[in-house]
Amino acid sequence: MTAPAGRRRWTRIAAAAAIGAAVALAGAWWAVGAAGGDGEWLEVTRGPLIVGVEVGGILRAVRSDLLGPPLITGTWNFTLASLLPEAPRSRRAPR
């Protein structure tokens, strides 16, 4: 005799949860080993929270592009007023 469909469904869910828990525990055990979990304890002290760190060096972009106005023959001086059409005047909002 076979089990009802509802019981089979819950059995599958329980089996999936057990497998998920086993994988999570194995991952945690591996992470502790990978982090050098040699049983060494460290002393913790209370102090100010360090938000930034000063560093030195040179930054270089991985990708960069040269951005500029559109190339129009005979036009070399651009302003936003000449690039954008004038917007209609709006009325003042009531207070």
Image (cartoon, rainbow, N blue to C red):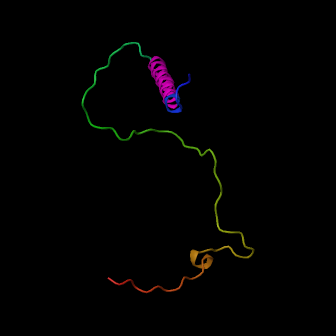
Image quadrant where one finds the N terminus: top right
Report how many numbered discs are placed on residues in the image.
0
Residue lying furthest left: 46
Q: Is residue 16 magenta?
A: yes
* Residue at horizontal 64 percent and vertical 47 percent from the top: 63
Q: Is residue 59 left or right of residue 77?
A: left
User: Is the stretch drawn in magenta largely helix, strand or loop?
Assistant: helix
Q: Which residues lie in the magenta part?
A: 9-35
- Compared with 21, 75 (above or below) is below
Q: Where is residue 77, by image quadrant?
A: bottom right
| Residue 26 lies in the magenta-colored region | yes
Q: Position of residue 22 (x, y in %)?
A: 48, 21
Q: Please tell me which residue is depicted at 50% across the width and 33% down the height of the picture.
A: 6
Residue at the front extreme of this rendering: 1
Q: Nearer the viewer, residue 44 or 68?
A: 44
Q: Position of residue 13 (x, y in %)?
A: 50, 30
What percent of the width, then of the height, locates residue 79?
A: 59, 75
